[in-house]
Amino acid sequence: MKFHAAAAALALAIVPGACMTVPNTHPLAGTQWQLTAIDTSGSTTTLTPAVQQRHTIAFVDGGEMQLQLDCNRGRSNWTAGRPKNGAGSISIAPVASTRMACPQPSFGTELAGLAEAQRFALTLDGRQLVIEAPQLRYTFTAAE
């Protein structure tokens, strides 16, 4: 009898935990973005729509990042604080990627530099993402 009572008590202790809600994921999780512009030392390079499609990042739930670096592919990990007023901090691990020579214009090498990123800003409508590193500013639009 003691065994059954202990098992019943354990089952009752587990059931309330099953009803607990999982915290919301980060707003970047599950999103994909196309690189539209790179700012370096006051100079802005705007990518054409065809080049934008070859330079993308995807924030996967669980902290994985997948990158299309022009003709190369890359992977990394990311963590970010909860944004306040659309801005927050971000940490991106070094990007591991293939290293094929891509036809010009190519910004894959620059995009792989995201590991130096420290801050991000997400517009209120969720259509633009800006990631800033010490010497670079990356501007993205939501991929469709």
Image (cartoon, rainbow, N blue to C red):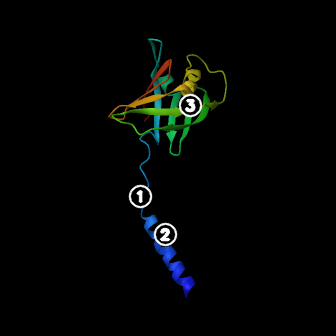
Residue type indicated by callout 2: Ile
Compared across the picture, whether 121 is left or right of 72 comes to left
- Measured in 3D between alpha carbons, the distance from the residue under mark 2 to the one under mark 3, in whole angstroms, is 43 Å
Q: Where does the image place residue 144, in percent across and percent down from the top left?
A: 43, 36
How many numbered dots are placed on residues in this image? Answer: 3
Q: Which residue is mark 1?
A: 21
| Left or right, 52 with reference to 87 | right
Of callouts 3 and 1, the N-terminal one: 1
Residue shown at 46%/42% (left/top)?
29
Q: Nearer the viewer, mark 2 or mark 3?
A: 2
SS for callout 2: helix
Which of labels 3 and 1 is toward the front?
1
Residue appearing at x 50%, y 45% in the figure: 61
Residue visible at 50% across and 79% down in the picture = 8
Sequence-first tag of 2 and 1: 2
Helix, strand or loop status at disc 1: loop
Residue 68's label in the rendered image is 3
